[in-house]
Image (tube, rainbow, N blue to C red):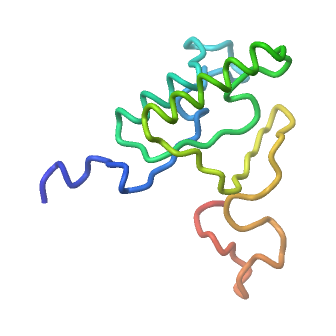
Amino acid sequence: MTADAYTPVPADKFSFGIWTVGWQGVDVFGPAVRPPMRADRAVRKLAELGAYGVNFHDNDVFDFGAGPGERDARIADFKRALVGTGLVENTAPTGSTSTTTTCSTSAPARGSGTRGSRTSSGRSSAPGWW
């Protein structure tokens, strides 16, 4: 098998959360370790790397508290980047967990923490996820 067999291409349909490339590295031990990355730049970079699509949550496209003008401009830039690269916006339900802030998403990405979603063995239906 050649190395090319492991190079991602859009046909693989990998979709990435914008926060996975735009995260500033802030944690409880200190401030950001890198500058913020705008969503439209993340889209273009992910397209270069062979991604199929992107998804987002919370404030990935514009900051909380952004005014209408900034919000509209960031959304327009994001949409232009999608059209220009051919990436799709993945709208599948996703889950998010934050140990420090309130999340704005509620649909679990895989399975659920409820007893009814577990197998008869008492294990999660998604082994290794929790």
Point 57% across, 13% down: residue? 33
Position of residue 87 in the picture relative to residue 59 (left or right): left
Q: Where residue 70 sits: x, y (%)?
A: 75, 14
Q: Residue furthest bottom?
A: 120
Give 129 or 44, whichever is nearer the viewer. Answer: 44
Residue 110, how many percent across, how many down? 67, 63
Picture residue at 38% right of the left edge, 56% below the top? 12
Q: Residue 60 placed where, x, y %? A: 68, 29
Quadrant for residue 5, please give it: bottom left
In percent of the image, x 77 and y 76: which residue is there? 117
Q: How many numbered dots are placed on residues in this image?
A: 0
Image quarter where the C terminus lies is bottom right
Vertical placement of residue 89 versus 70, above or below: below
Q: Residue furthest left?
A: 2
| Relative image position of residue 124 (x, y in whole percent) | 69, 72
- For this rendering, which residue is in front, 125 or 20? 20
The quarter of the image holding the N terminus is bottom left
- Picture residue at 68% right of the left edge, 14% below the top: 30
72 shown above or below 96: above
The correct choice, above or below, for 97 with respect to 1 in the image is above
Foreground of the two, 89 or 33: 89
